[in-house]
Amino acid sequence: MATLPIYNLNREEIGQIEVSDDIFGAEVRRHLFYEVIKWQLARRRAGTASTKGRSEVQGGGQKPYRQKGTGRARQGSRRAPNHVGGGTVHGPKPRSYAYKLNKKIREGAMRSALSLKASGGKLVVVQDLDLGEVKTRHAAEVFARLGNSNALVVDSENRSLELSVRNLPRVKYLHVDGLNLFDVLKYDTLVLSEPMVRRIEGRLAQ
């Protein structure tokens, strides 16, 4: 099994943790990133675009003018799409863009992302992420010491940490149950508390 260093909040190494090679030392299959990110972004789309068809616009119950003798093309309704204010042909309607993606693909992409972070030195394991107080300045100093202010920090039920980093533009707090590929790849450094490493291993165990 591979090992990762464990740090305190001052970036001092205080020990090591053994981690699964299948999760933190797996082959990086980058093609899976595209598939999962596309799936995530599709699920986030609101799908609220809506246009009115000819049966939904106002007016047009009466024939605009007589059928023959005017020299103009025959028209049956002012609600037709060729009139200003008429209905739209094949316009968008509210819909869901979500689709299914195989769970093995999603988990494989996450293993690849975690392995990529670990191999590049961008995975920081901290013994305890309890800041002790809700203070943005203190949180900014902590993440500067941990190596990068552009970080995704993952923990569980850590309200003081969540409140402390929410005004930091380049640091995001994420509950471990919400860990996702988009955020892991978006942020330069992934910061995990030691218990979260075990939670993630349990979630991704094959």
Image (tube, rainbow, N blue to C red):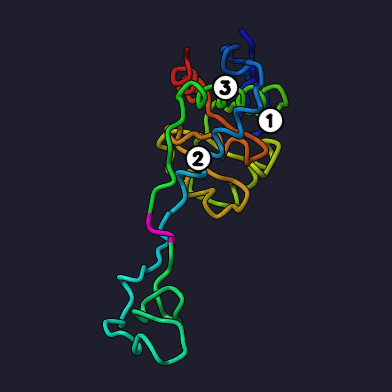
* Amino acid at dot 1: Lys
Judged left or right of residue 6, residue 180 is left
Q: Disc 1 designates what residue?
A: 122
Q: Secondary structure at mark 3?
A: helix
Quarter of the figure with residue 28: top right
Query: What are the residue bounds of the magenta stretch?
Result: 90-94
Q: Nearer the viewer, residue 94 or 138?
A: 94
Q: Secondary structure at mark 1?
A: loop
**Of the residues tagged 3 and 2, which is closer to the observer?**
2
Q: Disc 3 designates what residue?
A: 111
Disc 3, disc 2: CB below 8 Å?
no
Comes first in the chain, label 2 or label 1: 2
Q: Is residue 43 above or below residue 12?
A: below
Q: Quadrant of the N terminus?
A: top right
Q: Magenta: predominant secondary structure element?
A: loop
Q: Nearer the viewer, residue 169 or 138?
A: 169
Comes first in the chain, label 3 or label 2: 2
* Amino acid at dot 2: Gln
Q: Secondary structure at mark 2?
A: helix
Identity of the residue furthest to the left in this view: 61
Quarter of the figure with residue 117: top right
Q: Disc 2 designates what residue?
A: 40
Give x and y (percent) for residue 151.
62, 40
Number of other residues with Cα within 10 Å of mark 2, as a class: few under 14, some 14 to 19, many 20 or more:
some
Disc 2, disc 1: CB below 8 Å?
no
**Of the residues tagged 1 and 3, which is closer to the observer?**
3
Disc 1, disc 3: CB below 8 Å?
no
Comes first in the chain, label 1 or label 3: 3
Answer whether residue 179 is magenta in the image: no
Quarter of the figure with residue 110: top right
* Amino acid at dot 3: Arg
Query: At x 68% / y 27%, what residue is drawn?
Result: 12
